[in-house]
Amino acid sequence: MEQTIHLIFLLCGIVAVGFVLCISVYLVISGLPAIREIGLTKFLFGKVWAPTNATTGPQFGILPFILTSVYGTTGALLLGVPVGLMTAIFLAKAAPPRLAAVIRTAVQLLAGIPSVVYGLVGMIVLVPAIRRAFGLGSGACLLAAILVLTVMVLPSIINVAETALQAVPREYEEASLALGATETETYFRVSLPAARSGVAAAVVLGVGRAIGEAMAIIMVAGNVANMPGLFTSVRFLTTGIISGMSDAAVGSLYQQALFSIGLVLFLFIMLINVLLNVCIKRRKED
């Protein structure tokens, strides 16, 4: 019986790894032909994306998409991580049980709202508010995308970080309080460092949610292939793929370039995960 259960667990692990490998191989096979034909430098550092331009010829530069995704994800994390961590600390350590239950329910509801609803609310409420507040011709811009992404990453960060904080042994905190530290000092200097692995996992999930989001962003960011600016209509890597798939002919260079964008996005997420894991390892060794 034990061997059967171990075999089932092994098969489940192999299936998970197999899916990742299949996706990786498919993206490489589908994305490399366009990169070879366009040229790696022109593809990654070109500033113009005009795949259907019949006058000067198609151009497949995705630098605006890359920078927009980097800026948008970074902005969402700069706003969302502090708010999410503070909320997680409050729920795990300081909140009265009844209040904590209400806030947890609200966070779970946020996690369950479909992306298109976030985009719809952002398009109807946030975009006009930004347009009026800053006197813009259109409020569909990078700032609107950052604010929507900030709200969307909060549930992932709060839930995972709270679980990590609750797993910190109570003895650590009692020892800190016994040495004269206040509760606030204990939370930030003892509990939070002890839960850093779980907090890092929460940030990774937030990064994945932010950089992989498409439907909500396409509704509030303007979906124009411009170099990024806070009040400029922009297009992310994910929205670039969505926007082009309906227009690209099967087997065309345009479609292959869209697969290449997916490959770049995939490698970008993998790079972020590896860097964060290396940082966590070094901190543990230190």
Image (tube, grey):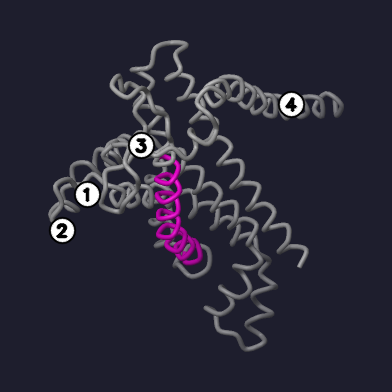
Q: Nearer the viewer, residue 276 or 56?
A: 56
What is the quadrant of residue 200 in the picture?
A: bottom right
Residue 27 visible, this orientation: yes
Q: Are marks 3 and 4 in contact (CB under 8 Å)?
A: no
Are there few (<14), some (14-19), or many (20+) residues within 10 Å of tag 3? Answer: some
Instruction: State the residue position of label 3.
Output: 115
Q: Position of residue 248 (x, y in %)?
A: 38, 16
Instruction: State the residue position of label 4.
Output: 14
Dot 3 or dot 1, earlier in sequence: 3
Instruction: Confirm whether the magenta stretch covers residue 80.
Output: yes
As measured in the structure, the alpha-carbon distance from the residue carrying label 3 to the one carrying label 1 is 15 Å
As measured in the structure, the alpha-carbon distance from the residue carrying label 1 to the one carrying label 2 is 10 Å
As measured in the structure, the alpha-carbon distance from the residue carrying label 4 to the one carrying label 1 is 44 Å
Outermost residue on the front side: it is 56
Instruction: State the residue position of label 2.
Output: 133
Instruction: State the residue position of label 1.
Output: 126
What is the quadrant of residue 170 in the picture?
A: bottom right
> As shown in the figure, which amino acid type bears the numbered disc 2?
Ala
Magenta residues span: 65-90
Q: Please tell me whether mark 4 sits on a helix, a strand or a loop.
A: helix
Q: Position of residue 98 (x, y in %)?
A: 41, 61
> As shown in the figure, which amino acid type bears the numbered disc 1?
Leu
Give me the residue at 28% from left, 22% from top. 55
